[in-house]
Amino acid sequence: MADADSDDGEDIFVSNSNPVSVSRGVSQPDRVTEEPSDLFSEEEEAASSTAAKANGVHSDDDNDLFADANVELSTDKSGSSARKEPSGPRHASSFTPSPAAMQPTSLEQLEEEEAKDSFDVDVAVTNPEKVGDGMNAYVAYKVSTRTSLPMFRSKVFSVRRRFSDFLGLYEKLSVKQSLHGCIIPPPPEKSVVGMTKVKVGMDDPSSVEFVERRRAALERYLQRVVSHPSLLQDPDVREFLEREDLPRAVNTQALSGAGFLKMINKASDAVNKMTIKMNESDTWFEDKFQEVENEEQQLRKLHVVVDSLVNHRKELCGNTAVFAKSLAMLGNSEDNTALSRALSQLAEVEDKMEQLHQEQAASDFFIFAELLGDYIRLLGAVRGCFDQRMRAWQRWQEAQSTLQKKREAEAKLLWANKPDKLQQAKEEITEWEARVTQYERDFDRIGMTVRKEVLRFEKEKAKDFKSQIIKYLEAMLQSQQRLIKFWEAFLPEAKAIA
Amino acid sequence: MMAFSSLRSVSVDLNHDASLLIDIPDALCERDKVKFTVHTKTTLSSFQKPDFSVPRQHEDFIWLHDTLVETEDYAGLIIPPAPPKPDFDSPREKMHKLGEGEATMTKEEYTKMKQELEAEYLAVFKKTVQVHEIFLQRLSSHPVLSKDRNFQIFLEYDQDLSVRRKNAKEMFGGFFKNMVKSADEVLISGVKEVDDFFEQEKTFLLDYYSKIKDSTAKAEKMTRAHKNIADDYIHISATLNSLAADDMTANKNLNIILSLQKVEGRVASDQDLKLTELLRYYMRDIQAAKDLLYRRARALADYENSNKALDKARLKSKDIPQAEEHQRQCLQKFDKLSESGKKELTSFKGRRVVAFRKNFIEMAELEIKHAKNSVTLLQGCIELLKSN
């Protein structure tokens, strides 16, 4: 029952009333190869790391997620490479220069609160299952939640949801006045091609990859939603997580076809067509917007290259497999026994290399490429907030000009001496004065929200990128270590050739 | 840095005999023409000077190879395969693309790509120098071929060889060479073999050739894919660079990506040298061995024909002595070919096995070395990122 205005007000000026804590950073897609049969099953690595120190009772530690229901949440397992990375204790250190604050005290307070906040909701999206047949078939996912928050009915629960439900959630959140200025995480894009293949059959490798990709993306989406303090409060979010049967979302057309970014860009264009240009007393917004646009551009470029990397690595896989077979044939032809054996061994090594390349390509894609894709969409959402602020300003300005007109009308009436019309005019003036005050307050509020949100977003982004890159590098490290073992095993074979 | 000596392991035990030492100390690349400096150091009196150099073009090497192939006396020898034409197509195409894409790249990216391109040019250059060098060294270390008159001319003649080349072409018309190219497999398989050794060799070589040709092509594709990945890393690091400006974390990531790219590039070129070049070289060498089998098969066919001719002559009681003489000569030629052929093929086996061994060991060691480098790099970077 979030009452938007008062909530925001409390957020800014008063210490937060919610004792919520989220233990996890934003997005850590599961490793492709691991499909946990029991959710959140703990990874083996019990090696303690220096990094994560639990904040209070709760594990900042994602590995501990949903291990067994009986396991103490305070067990401090390390941030291992395999799974979701712990975000570590949140520092109050800001990565961005403090905005030229209109209300410096409150912003500092804000940052401190961010540091103190720790959330306690974990969500996971698993078990994709095809429901139905033919073109009406769809995939249902299990959405599981584990929480210690009192506002939920139970501590551990799960529901089944389909893709359009996730889109529906976004739809609902994005139109809420109370959430204006917030960076609402965008859902993954629709894909007619991908889904059609799946409807036909879920067994071929490209369908499997598509479903896994979508599952991971939906999970990251939900994780971002629940780690947002305002969104977590939202009844629609709660309903999404808890309610057994969700009414089908019907308004997802907006997000169909070319998807989310197209929508954002259309809205942007509308703002750009505004005739009155905003006079920024505070350059923070202009500068930040520019930064966001630049960053989005660079990420797009990067995404293109990473896509190319993924494709080339897949090509390498194919070429290596083919080469391994050819080498095996050559080994069979070879008449020197030792050399023949060595050639066969080399063929096996190349086969293992292909496996490594395959895993590396998955890592390139699921960790690196998807991260970039997520952030390109997120930056679009950030732009959307700035646009919302502009529109709020616009509304305020328009109200002001309407008020001005009413005052002029009143002046005319005074001169023309029409008392009854005058009364009406006075009433209208009062009404519009109230509106102007309201809209001005709205505008200021949105401005504050946007600033806060951007701050939070930048922190999350830095954390997210860092943890994903660590994950990527750790996957690569493992791969290289295995490579060494393969070649070290081959070396004696090569030396044995006589 | 590419090891200059690495390609020599393709054919081992060359250039050890001090009586005739040959190398190509440098070469010039003008447009697409490569001018090799062939340097000879010798104690043999058959040469005018003990130490001298001459400039030679690729076509000169081909001329030398062809004259050797067409020399009857060498029919029983495996003539070392001719070096392939210098191929700058790939880096040239890349340079073209780079020029076209210059506008869309950042300065750093362009510089880095250009550096990589220059490295690739250099690699192709070094490869072609070495493959030409090996050809000469195979000749100089062969007991019979090293004494060839044309070989000496090639090494010593300080004028332009192109005139002599043209004359040679007119004389032989490339007849033998063309014949070999088109008919060898058919003839070799068709002739009834009398000798077990050669029967085995024939079966083995024909089969092995097709397999190694296949492997060579697939190895080339694999190497190319590796190179593409290395290039992608360049683009990634360039873009990260633009993103990174003031973000410290990104800068660290940037450095890691750059280093990874270097390693990937080294892996690609080492694999190219040790594996792909090895396969490529021996594919050509086996073709040369097949050519020997072909010539022997021809000699056998000639001998059988001469037998038939002798029978016919005896039947007709005409020209018997000539027919007998002809038959005797054919037999002699055939026996000589068989004898030297056996020797050549046996030593070829040994040479091949030794070369494969050396290259496989070196390749495995390099892969391990590069992977260990990567591991250290990655561990360091992960530590750094985690400790922040």
Image: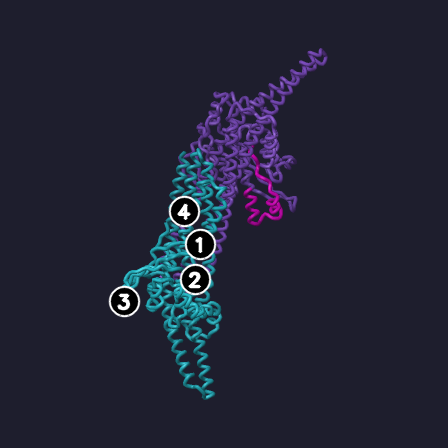
Badge 4 is on which residue?
B263
Check the residue under mark 2 and report the chain it is in: B
Q: Which color scheme did the rendering employ for the protein? A: by chain
Q: Residue furthest bottom?
A: B317
- x then y, percent, for residue B74: 38, 70
Amino acid beneath label 3? Ser
Label 1 SS:
loop
**Picture colour for chain A:** purple
C-alpha separation, residue under disc 3 versus residue under disc 2: 36 Å
Which residue in the structure is indicated by mark 1?
B88
Q: Chain of mark 4?
A: B
Q: Could you tell me how far apart the alpha carbons at marks 1 and 3 are, in whole angstroms?
A: 40 Å
Badge 4 amino acid: Val
Between A362 and B311, the one nearer to me in the picture: B311
**Residue A200 in magenta stretch:** yes
Q: Which residue type carries mark 1?
A: Phe
- N-terminal of the pair, mark 1 or mark 4, is 1
Q: Residue A88 location, x and y as percent?
A: 44, 33
Residue bearing mark 2: B283
Question: Residue B249: which quarter of the image?
Answer: top left
When the figure is inspected, residue B352 is found, relative to residue A247, above or below; the finding is below
Residue A74 falls in which quadrant of the image?
top left
Distance between mark 1 and mark 4 Cα atoms: 23 Å
